[in-house]
Amino acid sequence: MSDLQAALYARVSSEQQSQAQTIQSQVAALRARIEADGLRLVPEYAFVDDGYSGSTLIRPALERLRDALASGQVDRLYVHSPDRLARKYAYQVLLIDEWQRAGVELVFLNRELSGSPEDELLLQVQGMIAEYERAKILERSRRGKRHKAQVGGVSVLSGAPYGYRYVTLAEGGGQARYEICEDEAQVVRQVFTWVARERLSLGEVCRRLQAAALPTRSGKTWWDRTTIWDMLKNPAYRGQAAFGKTRSGPLQPRLRAQRGQPLQPRRAHCAQDVPVADWLLIPVPALVSDAEFDAAQEQLDENRRRARTHQRGARYLLQGLVVCACCGYAYYGKAISNRARKGHRRDYAYYRCIGTDAYRFGGQRVCTNTQVRTDRLEQAVWQQIGLLLDDPERLVNEYERRLQVAEHPPAASESAALDKQIAKLNQGISRLIDSYSEGYLDKDEFEPRIRRFKERLLTLQAQAEQHRDERQRQAELQLIIGRLEEFAARVSAGLEHLDWSERRALIRTLVKRIEINREHVNVVFRVEDTIGGTETGPFLQHCRRGD
């Protein structure tokens, strides 16, 4: 048996493919090929991304694989086909070039990779065709669903909200529809009555539903405010189900992972809200009248206005910045109750993890991280700010340096022009591939033209990525640069003289988030190469929590 260290990589992009055991068939074929080549596969070198899109390179197994290959742990990598690495041709080229430079031999099951110009051309064409076919399928699907919604087809909704049962095309004799579930419909009507006529808050509605032991669709008796809010805002209950309430957009950066979601998203896009005027409305059986639905909307607005009048503004210096490093939920400020005071005066409160509130999760905590005294945490963070701003001369020098760098940021028009060129070039590549596949171009004409297209596309994509990175960096710096002179003056006068609102503004300008762990507090600044030019990264401030 050879001494070469083998590894495999497999990927499927959807939950349906995962459930269909497509990933198992890939792994089985790869293991068989490795065994046939006389190599041994160590379990930790089987890298599998199950249910991750090929349109992004941010995948857990792929990240580990790239680290292993870069460190020289693997000699030969087995992959079923190039589109398992990535759907985008540029990403395929990036990975293959990266691994070949590291001295890794790459084996595809569906074809041999000899390194000849013909093989390189075939690999390029396959990658471009895979990317083109994916875009074409997505666009056809989108247009087809939109047309179906415009003619009133319920099948594009694919599911029914609480109070209805979705009758599929097969069950409905070729016609999908909503059927009213009377038990659930009574609950929906009762909720609208409580809000529209009795003017109850969402919290009181939840308490009444739980007191009546009325189950949710999943069988739980614990109702969440968000569930009631979505119910009251859903136009399906007035007889008009909405299609196209969200659209797919680029993934937005987040301070923490969404509830129940992994830190690394499976897909490089997210849902974005669409204006109500752009929704497509599909007739369905109504559960409440238009008047009652409108009355509920008015009461929701009234409840919101009433809540705002009771708010006393921001009460905590670090409000909105503190997150739990254990579960990813936010920390919020919570005052000490009169019962807990036991007759003693307490001039402080606590920052508390949302995940430790059992009432938010059906009576069960999802996190055991400890709460933190507000005065101690705020003092620790403020000390870190003081260390950052303790040298006015260094501060001014940093201001001047960064201002010079920021004098010529890439214009938005340049980025838009690059995006337009990339779109036109992709269209040209698609037309070129179509012409070649239909026989209008022979191989001698196709090869040089597709190579020029590929080189130009890679150049433009690199420039566009550089512009995006620069704009992001400028956005972070802009929060600081505009006020550095003021900060320098404040440092000279003494930070201790800042009032509460000025301190809060300063912290929000410099700090991106504050991560609370059981042992320490990590202050993450907006710009990693912090003022002063050091390369130490974010500061680490230990903060003991006690009563």
Image (cartoon, grey):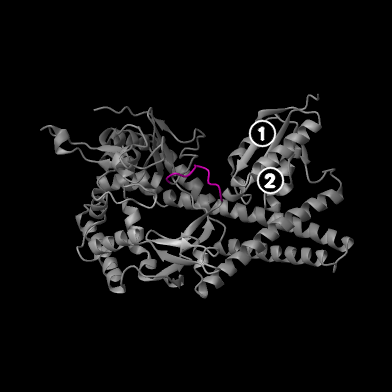
Residue drawn at (47%, 49%) of the image: 476
Q: Amino acid at mark 1?
A: Ala
In the drawing, does residue 85 fall left or right of residue 280? Answer: right
Residue 415 position within the rendered picture, expressed as x and y whole percent measured from the top left: 59, 61
Badge 1: few (under 14), some or many (20 or more) residues near its Cα, within 10 Å? some
- Amino acid type of disc 2? Leu
Residue at (49% x, 68% y) in the render: 154
Residue 494 visible, this orientation: no
Quadrant including the C terminus = top left
> Which residue is more in the foreground, 119 or 393?
119
Q: Nearer the viewer, residue 151 or 468?
A: 151
Q: Main secondary structure of the magenta part?
A: loop
In the image, residue 260 lies in the stretch drawn in magenta: yes
Quarter-wise, where is residue 324 in the image?
A: top left
- The structure residue drawn at horizontal position 29% and vertical position 51%, both measured from the top left corner, is 214
In x, y percent, where is residue 94? 70, 46
- Residue 331 visible here: yes
Q: Position of residue 388 (x, y in %)?
A: 40, 37
Quadrant of the image for the N terminus?
top right
What stretch of residues is rendered in magenta? Answer: 259-267
Mark 1 falls on what kind of element?
strand
Residue 223 colored in magenta in the image: no
Q: At x 68% / y 34%, what residue is drawn? A: 70
The x and y percentages for residue 76 are: 76, 33
- The answer to whether residue 219 is above or below residue 427 is above
Q: Secondary structure at mark 2?
A: helix
Nearest-to-viewer mark from 1 and 2: 1
Residue at image mark 1 = 46
Q: Give the numbered dot on residue 99.
A: none
The foreground one among 171 and 274 is 171
Q: Which residue is mark 2?
A: 85
Is 238 located above or below residue 501 in the figure?
below
